[in-house]
């Protein structure tokens, strides 16, 4: 069971030493705190407001792969407007490709290494 707020505040004020202090209790901060705790570290997680009340509480929580940007990049690469500067168009597409592949690798890592935090949700 999760200790009540009063008990947590007393623990923070007691002078106890923690291995990790996470500042921010949104999706990222809570995920970091969970991962550290699962690795056997003692963790304190503090939040300015209420946990999950900030920006990350409003996000979709989707692990994004960037496929829409890849499609847009391909359409732009093969459009007539690229004839004036083909090298620039190829460079721009390569940047998009690298960004999408980075997102794809990160999503794969999360699905493989953190199955307790991730699950597939069909879009269509």
Image (spheres, rainbow, N blue to C red):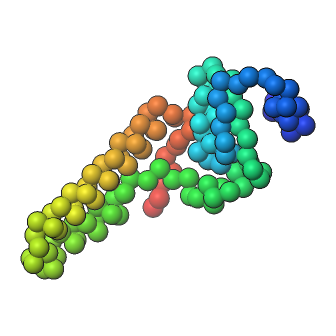
The one nearer the camera, 52 or 88, is 88
The one nearer the camera, 117 or 18, is 18
Q: Is residue 76 above or below residue 122?
A: below
Quadrant containing the C terminus is: bottom left
Q: What residue lies at 81% left-to-right and 25% top-to-bottom?
A: 15
The one nearer the camera, 30 or 49, is 49
Quadrant containing the N terminus is: top right
Residue 6, position in %: x, y? 90, 37
Horizontal side of 19 relative to 115 (left or right) equals right
Horizontal side of 65 relative to 96 (left or right) equals right
On the question of residue 41 being in view, the answer is yes
Residue 49, position in %: x, y? 77, 53
Numbered circles on residues, count:
0
Q: What residue lies at 71% left-to-right and 37% top-to-bottom?
A: 45
Q: What residue lies at 88% left-to-right and 31% top-to-bottom?
A: 10
Q: What residue lies at 10% left-to-right and 70% top-to-bottom?
A: 86
| Among the 4 quarters of the image, the one containing residue 90 | bottom left
Q: Is residue 121 above or below residue 31?
A: below
Horizontal side of 55 relative to 5 (left or right) equals left
On the question of residue 4 being in view, the answer is no
């Amino acid at each position: 069971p999760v200790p009540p707020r009063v008990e947590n505040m007393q623990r923070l004020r007691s002078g106890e030493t923690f291995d990790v202090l996470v500042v921010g209790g949104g999706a990222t901060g809570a995920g970091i705190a969970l991962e550290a705790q699962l690795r056997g570290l003692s963790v304190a997680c503090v939040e300015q407001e209420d946990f999950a009340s900030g920006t990350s509480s409003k996000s979709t929580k989707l692990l994004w792969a960037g496929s829409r940007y890849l499609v847009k990049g391909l359409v732009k690469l093969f459009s007539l407007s690229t004839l004036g500067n083909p090298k620039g168009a190829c460079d721009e597409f390569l940047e998009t490709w690298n960004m999408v592949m980075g997102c794809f690798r990160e999503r794969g890592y999360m699905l493989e290494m953190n199955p307790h935090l991730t699950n597939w949700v069909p879009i269509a």
